[in-house]
Amino acid sequence: MTAVELRNYLTNRISRIEDLDFLNAIRIILESREDSEKIYNLSDFERKKIRKSKLQFKKGLGIINEKVFGEIGKWLKEK
């Protein structure tokens, strides 16, 4: 079955469905596909922050996750 044939078949079948829950489930599936295909455009601010972070990483100025989580854990215990 070609894409056109399948699309026509699905359109025909969907047009006969009366069950709102089922139609909403189909809508959710279709919207999730659309959401996964969206491209996020970075702002100038975000691009600058990423560039700065990459430079810091190259210079060895990053902090390992374990250290960050440890510091957060200490901070939360103090609160």
Image (cartoon, helix red, strand yellow):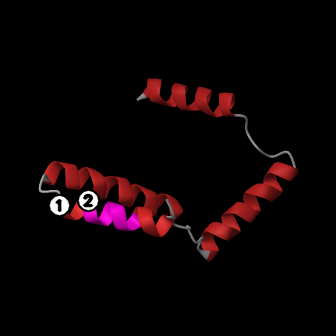
**Crowdedness of circle 1 by 10 Å Cα count: few (<14), some, many (20+)?**
few
Query: Can you tell which mark lies on residue 13?
Result: 2
Q: Quadrant of the C terminus?
A: top left
Task: Decide whether residue 11 is among the magenta residues.
Answer: yes
Which image quarter: residue 67? top right
In screen coordinates, is 5 left or right of 25?
right
Residue 47, image x, y percentages: 67, 69
Which sits in the foreground, 11 or 67? Answer: 11
Identity of the residue drawn at 44% across and 58% down: 33
Farthest residue in the right direction? 59
Which image quarter: residue 15? bottom left
Farthest residue in the front direction? 1
- What amino acid is labelled 2 in the image? Arg
Identity of the residue drawn at 59% across and 74% down: 43
Which range is magenta?
A: 7-12
Identity of the residue drawn at 13% across and 52% down: 19
**Crowdedness of circle 2 by 10 Å Cα count: few (<14), some, many (20+)?**
few
Which sits in the foreground, 42 or 62? Answer: 42
Q: What element carries label 2?
A: helix
In screen coordinates, is 45 left or right of 30?
right
- What amino acid is labelled 1 in the image? Arg
Which sits in the foreground, 4 or 67? Answer: 4
In screen coordinates, is 7 left or right of 56?
left
Residue 7 vertical placement versus 18 (above, below)? below
Residue 35, image x, y percentages: 45, 61
Query: Can you tell which mark lies on residue 33?
Result: none
Measured Cα–Cα span from mark 1 to mark 2 = 6 Å
Query: Can you tell which mark lies on residue 16?
Result: 1
Q: What is the chief secondary structure element of the magenta stretch?
A: helix
Q: Is mark 1 on a helix, strand or loop?
A: loop
Proximity of marks 1 and 2: CB atoms separated by less than 8 Å: yes
